[in-house]
């Protein structure tokens, strides 16, 4: 079989996994399909209520016996089936296995009158990079279709121990190294709020399914924005924890063994309390005893309490920047490899998003101070070189195995015209990375002494655009600079692009070619209604504090809501 | 100037740094110089008492005003001057700077009636890999002589904030990648207990000076045994913390930027309480705000308490192995790259050392169970490949800069006949490392379920020999396998080789060529009196627990003593 046949067969198997009674007519849908769960008639009112709940509420009801896992799982399976038909978001869908698992959990509860763990009976959706025993993990590569996994990834095994139910593995861009979700197996996944917008990537299937509430908590991965971009584009919360907080062992990946910048796992969800439920449930299983890269750091309530007590007296102190393209951010006495190539001014909706967060915080008594995106373009240049350090050998050899072509946008991050670096060059890059991280820590301390207060985190854009139109994702720097630092980042949804508020800037002079291309893409009409988010960034391994800050910002914005 | 002249000039400058009034006749010394501090007449009785104290006692007296930093510093400078004359252990000696620093600390105390920090006034010796502003860091390379440092290493800066006084930087083997201490600048550093024995390496100057009590706490680094071997060979305690516990930023190093296996900093000292003083003092400065690689993990008293409460009820459960060469340790169903090349049976004194610890623990009610050195030879083979992954480019190009030759033993660890690996090969090695670490964690869990108890740590040899004769250090595997795992290891001194107890085994059949060479080296007469130590190994980042266990073992052995 040629690669097209293998891909077509896989696509057909996915389609077939949806029972006939959950099928709908997908022709002639509106651009937005957000109302389809209610309109389709596939879900009962109870099932709609379940899928519109928070995960925190659901696990409480499952633990008290008010809800059965079978009912909850069935509701999410139905809504996920709609999601796949409307958004094209699944690479594996296995409702039968899920319902069997749910029945076993219900039987356990029946017998012992207690939940198996903190996630008892809760469906969790997974990016198709997580391995589940006996299922396929294609990760968007045609070459990997037909390989069945022999064991669970560590995170899957621990979620299972905690009581989670698995029912779907969601789509990704071929190779994962793109922030839109397209592959040669099922094609493109689209945004539930507007099919003309990207759902983001690489955890784009998670963004789409959770945004549509075909999932309540989805698990993605992030090495250059892949959790944060789909969260932002789908008006969701997302966590990119620092490396070593969540287990990653036994997962599929591109460029496996690359350790210069680590990909990390994290949740995409509807609120910080749901995010906290996920993280605390995983930490409760002591993942450091299963994956050598996990740091033995249980959930630190004391770190949350520090933020809580600041909220009660004195307030938070936060930095912010709305652009890495502001000339005043230029740093003296330094050599840039690419000068200003990696500076891009965000579109008007993103600038307004930052301004909204800053003014809301100030209005509520918090201190918000300007923050330098320190040597941002140096960082972006360095991490781009890391992504491409093998000259694309790993990903291009996987493509060659099946003969499939590369997807669009692919070469924006993995440029095969760059040569592979040798070991001594890699060590030099790693040394530069460490020096950069350490200098940025010094900048943080200096800024604190200027301000005279501890700075709790900073507020920054994630992308220069609201949920982007297809094939228009061009600039990863706002996200990827944070990956190079390995800092904790929490995505907070803020608002929606508004053609009446977010006019196109007249007479804007592009900073560079890339900035010009990004600015040219802005069209107030086309982006009207697109989700706008910010990231809250704390230093390394500050998940407890940064999540607490994000929760407060969401609360002040009024965005921590269930429908 | 040729390299010989540059080296000779540096050596002369070191010699000149010793004031005439601290000079002794170094001819015709006994093999052991341990009695020289008392015999030389250079130190007053008070100075002998100070240098024979514990660091914990000294900082208490400095903090209460009972002692002045000037007196303590002067005492250690004198004893260090003796150490260098007798052992050849210093690459930088700067008593004037130290005494100036001590006076400033005394003035601070006088003015504010309180110490500047937990190490107020305490002299700390440093391996010549730590940078101190305006001093040289040659690290044993002739090429680096004459380069003066522009700033302190992060650990030096934080120790300084905590009140430490610096007075000496000690010798290392050229490149650091050898466990004996020889370079072309000052030659060989010898063991204070017997000049025919090695002081170990690469933190060998620290082992020698602290063993001689010319230092009270010395700071070394370890990527393949370099803290543990000098600790073991000098009857000292030593800590190889997991990577990320202690700051390493802004230090000199070979193969800088190599991150596949990290070198780590740690103390070499006379007791676990002194070790704890060092670690808690550094953590107290929040090193994670200064070095991006440091994990934000303050000292966890609760982890120590777990061990303390086990000591009060039920006791500890520990694994042990005395050899990685035991055929019964062969693991089924695996492929070895080098089959049994990396298995070496320890000399009789080491086997007796392990047995002494095991029987002492059992006698005191603790549970001690056999432990599999899991795929030890695979691990040693893998880490040897990592050390050599650039084909020696980094170290050999530094040698070429000055023209100096490589030291003996050099090629045991860095084999220039091996080619450099490419990026994809490196990623494969890194993936194998992670898989190995993760499988070993699984073995740990399996062993716990077999034993039915949490296993707190395991007891293992550090080297196959007691303090080794010169140029006879051949096998790094007992130490380096732990580096590959990045587990916490604490060295506990146990006993001394004894020709009447430690007979040469008759009719021993060598496991392989290396084992044959190591066994041939054993001579009960020549090793009589050589220090014997074990390492106590806990999982990653278990410094609190592992140190508490090591302290208890030292207490039971009666080795936590001051002279």
Image: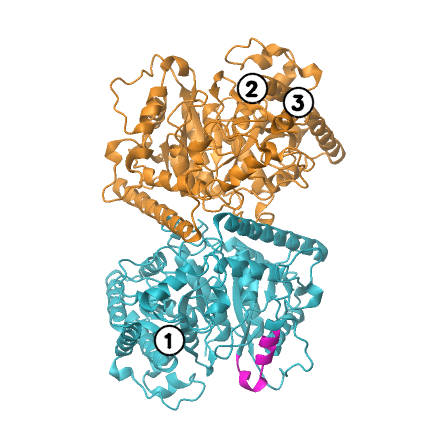
Chain colours: A orange, B cyan
Q: Residue at x 60, y 31 (%)?
A: A142
- Does residue B126 appear left or right of residue A200 in this picture? left
User: On the picture, is A314 further left or further right than A105?
Assistant: left
Q: Secondary structure at mark 2?
A: helix
Q: Label 3: state its secondary structure.
A: helix
Give the residue number, with chain letter if any, for mark 1: B89
Which residue lies under the disc numbered 3?
A12
| Residue A445 in view in this figure | yes
Question: Which is more toward the observer, A415 or B168?
Answer: A415
In this rendering, the answer to whether B185 lies above or below B299 is: below
Q: Which residue is mark 2?
A: A87
User: In this orientation, which residue lies closer to the viewer: A188 or B27?
Assistant: A188
Write down the region rendered in magenta: B515-530
Residue B527 part of the magenta segment: yes
Q: Is residue A453 left or right of residue B540?
A: left
Chain letter of the residue beneath label 3 in the structure image? A
Q: What mark, if any, has residue B219 been given in the picture?
A: none
Q: Residue at x 45, y 26 (%)?
A: A232
Instruction: Decide: few, some or many residues near mark 2? Use Cα within 10 Å; few <14, some 14-19, many ≥20.
Output: many
Tag in front: 3 or 2:
3
Are labels 2 and 1 on one chain?
no
Q: Are the residues flagged by discs 3 and 1 in contact, CB closer than 8 Å?
A: no
- Report the label total: 3
Q: Quadrant of the C terminus of chain B?
A: bottom left
Q: How many C-alpha atoms fall within 10 Å of the one at disc 3: few (<14), some, or many (≥20)?
A: few
Q: Which marked residue is nearer to the observer: mark 2 or mark 1?
A: 2
Q: Residue B75: image x %, image y %?
A: 32, 77
């Amino acid at each position: 079989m040629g690669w097209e046949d293998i891909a077509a067969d896989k696509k057909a198997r996915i389609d077939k996994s949806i029972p006939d009674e959950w099928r709908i007519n997908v022709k002639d849908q509106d651009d937005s399909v957000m109302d389809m769960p209610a309109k389709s008639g596939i879900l009962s009112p109870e099932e709609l209520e379940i899928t519109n709940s928070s995960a925190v509420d659901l696990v409480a009801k499952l633990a008290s016996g008010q809800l059965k896992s079978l009912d909850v799982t069935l509701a999410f399976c139905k809504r996920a089936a709609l999601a796949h038909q409307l958004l094209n978001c699944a690479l594996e869908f296995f409702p039968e296995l899920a319902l069997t698992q749910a029945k076993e959990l219900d039987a356990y509860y029946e017998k012992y009158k207690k939940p198996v763990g903190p996630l008892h009976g809760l469906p969790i959706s997974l990016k198709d990079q997580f391995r589940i025993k006996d299922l396929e993990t294609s990760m968007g590569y045609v070459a990997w279709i037909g390989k069945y996994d022999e064991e669970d990834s560590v995170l899957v095994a621990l979620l299972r121990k905690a009581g989670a139910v698995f029912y779907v593995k969601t789509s990704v861009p071929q190779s994962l190294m793109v922030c839109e979700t397209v592959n040669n197996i099922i094609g493109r996944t689209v945004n539930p709020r507007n099919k003309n917008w990207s759902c983001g990537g690489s955890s784009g299937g998670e963004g789409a399914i959770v945004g549509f509430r075909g999932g309540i908590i989805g698990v993605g991965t992030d090495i250059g924005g892949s959790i944060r971009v789909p969260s932002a584009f789908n008006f969701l919360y997302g966590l990119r924890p620092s490396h070593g907080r969540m287990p990653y062992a036994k997962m599929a990946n591109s460029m496996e063994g690359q350790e210069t910048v680590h990909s990390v796992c994290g949740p995409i969800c509807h609120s910080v309390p749901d995010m906290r439920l996920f993280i605390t449930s995983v930490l409760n299983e002591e993942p450091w005893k299963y994956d050598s890269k996990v740091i033995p750091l249980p959930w630190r309530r004391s770190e949350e309490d520090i933020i809580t007590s600041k909220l009660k007296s004195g307030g938070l102190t936060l930095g912010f920047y709305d652009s890495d393209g502001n000339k005043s951010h230029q740093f003296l006495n330094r050599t840039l490899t690419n000068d200003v190539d990696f500076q891009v001014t965000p579109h008007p909706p993103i600038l307004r998003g930052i301004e909204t967060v800053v003014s809301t915080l100030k209005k509520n008594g918090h201190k918000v101070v300007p923050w330098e995106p320190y040597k941002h373009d140096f960082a972006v240049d360095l991490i781009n070189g890391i992504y491409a350090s093998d000259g694309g050998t790993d990903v291009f050899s996987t493509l060659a195995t099946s003969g499939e072509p590369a997807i669009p946008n692919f070469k924006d991050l993995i440029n095969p015209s760059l040569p592979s670096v040798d070991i001594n060059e890699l060590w030099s890059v790693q040394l530069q990375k460490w020096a950069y991280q350490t200098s940025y820590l010094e900048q943080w301390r200096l800024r604190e002494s200027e301000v005279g207060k501890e700075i709790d985190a900073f507020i920054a854009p994630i992308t220069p655009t609201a949920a982007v139109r297809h094939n228009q994702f061009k600039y990863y720097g706002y996200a990827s600079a944070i990956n190079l630092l390995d800092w904790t980042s929490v995505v907070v949804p803020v608002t929606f692009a508004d053609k009446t508020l977010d006019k196109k800037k007249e007479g804007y002079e592009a900073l560079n070619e890339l900035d010009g291309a990004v600015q040219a893409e802005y069209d107030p009409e086309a982006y009207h209604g697109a989700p706008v988010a910010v990231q809250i960034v704390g230093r390394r391994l500050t998940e407890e504090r940064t999540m607490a800050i994000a929760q407060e910002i969401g609360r002040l914005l009024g965005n921590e809501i269930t429908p």
